[in-house]
Every structure is written in C-alpha cells, then in structure tokens.
Amino acid sequence: MTAGSGCRRTATDHRDHLELLRSGVPGPGGIWADLGSGTGAFTLALADLLGPAATIVSVDRDGSALREQQRVMADRFPAVRLDPRVADFREPLSLPTLDGIVMANALHFLPRDQQVAVVRRLVPQLRPGGRFLVVEYDAERGNPWVPHPFGPATWARIAAEAGLAGPREIGRVPSRWLGAIWSGVSERPGLQPRGA
C-alpha cells in the first residue's frame, strides 16, 4: 500500500509494515538494526523482507518486549539471526557495521534537537551507502503518547543535519492516530547499497 492507494483501513498490520519498509530495503540478506523495536512489529517485517541470510540487531529498553519478540521471531522467521539487546538508542551503542537501520515510531519520543543528535551519532554505524529508514506519524504536533512526530519535510531537514543524503518518502498508510503513518529513507553518503 502506497500513497494514493485509496486504502481505508485504519489499523496497521504486517502487510502495512512490509509496504512501509519494502522500498527502503534493497535486497535480501545483510546486517540491519531495528532501534526502539518494542515487541517487534517492524522487526518481523524486516525479517520477512531480508530473508534467512540476514542478521537483525534489535534494540529496546524493555527486556520483556524483546523476549516476546524473540518468541514470535523463532516461530515465524527461525532462519533469520536475531541479536536482541536491552539498551537505549539515546546512548552510544556498540553495533556491527550495518547495511541499514530502522527506527519505527521511536524518534518521536525525543525532542527535535535530540532527534538530530541521535541520528547523527548513528550514521557512522552504517557502511557507506547504508540506509536509514524511519516510520513516523505524519504530524508536526504530537500528543502525550506521540509527543514529537514529524512529516517528510522535517525528516529531510533532520537527515541533512545528521549527514544523510537523499531523504525521500517511500510509503504511507492511513492511521486513526494523527491521520497517517509514513516511511522515509536516506543513505549514508558513499557507495551504493547492495542490490541497488
């Protein structure tokens, strides 16, 4: 489902998660990180897109959420290597060199100036040409549950200030919360991503 598809569903599901990420994932395999992954809705979508040759480093502060994620991943995508880590993406992380990073509904918990700082600190974790995917509510004003969402234009500014190139929207689904959820991708400058 992409922008303009006319779909009226309001709850996101695995198909929506796949469509929000699909255009940002250049091919199967590789090493990716899902930061602020929670129980793993987008980790599962990433596993589905990357296939059995992939490794996904899944980072969240909630150990019980990661345990639930491990259980579901083992059932649905047992060949994908999952590396769960209880950690806070706002702090420095020791990660392998990554082909991509996904931050789905995670950056909106940080004020805008902290969003830029966190993304800037994560960019060196990507190999040249590696991709940085965001999934966010399409709003510039939040609420107590989604305090600092942002739309594609704001992501373009955040990405540029953090040292990423080519920010663009790649997906959109309707949402009963703040109207829509959209996805975007940018790259670390350098070589083209695998499979591009």
Image: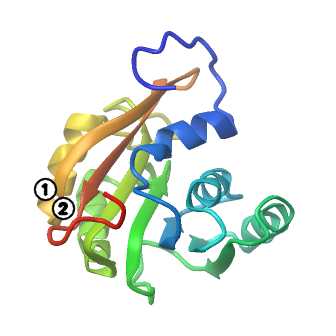
**Image point 36% across, 61% down: which residue?**
195
Depth check: 119 or 7 in front? Answer: 7
Give how far apart the Cα atoms at labels 2 and 1 are. 5 Å
Rendering colour mode: rainbow
Q: Is residue 11 left or right of residue 148?
A: right
**Image point 26% across, 80% down: which residue?**
124
* Residue 125, label in figure: none
Q: Are marks 2 and 1 in contact (CB under 8 Å)?
A: yes
Depth check: 4 or 61 in front? Answer: 4
Quarter the C terminus occupies: bottom left
Q: Is residue 162 left or right of residue 122?
A: left
Q: Which residue is mark 1?
A: 160
Image coordinates of residue 103 in percent, x first then y, are 45, 57
For badge 2, the amino acid type reads: Leu
Q: Which residue is mark 2?
A: 164
Residue 122 falls in image quadrant:
bottom left
**Image point 44% across, 29% down: which residue?**
172
Image coordinates of residue 52 in percent, x first then y, are 66, 69
Crowdedness of circle 1 by 10 Å Cα count: few (<14), some, many (20+)?
Answer: some
- Which secondary structure, mark 1? helix
Image coordinates of residue 170 in percent, x first then y, are 36, 38
- Which secondary structure, mark 2? loop
Q: Is residue 100 left or right of residue 62?
A: left
Depth check: 120 or 76 in front? Answer: 76
For badge 1, the amino acid type reads: Ala
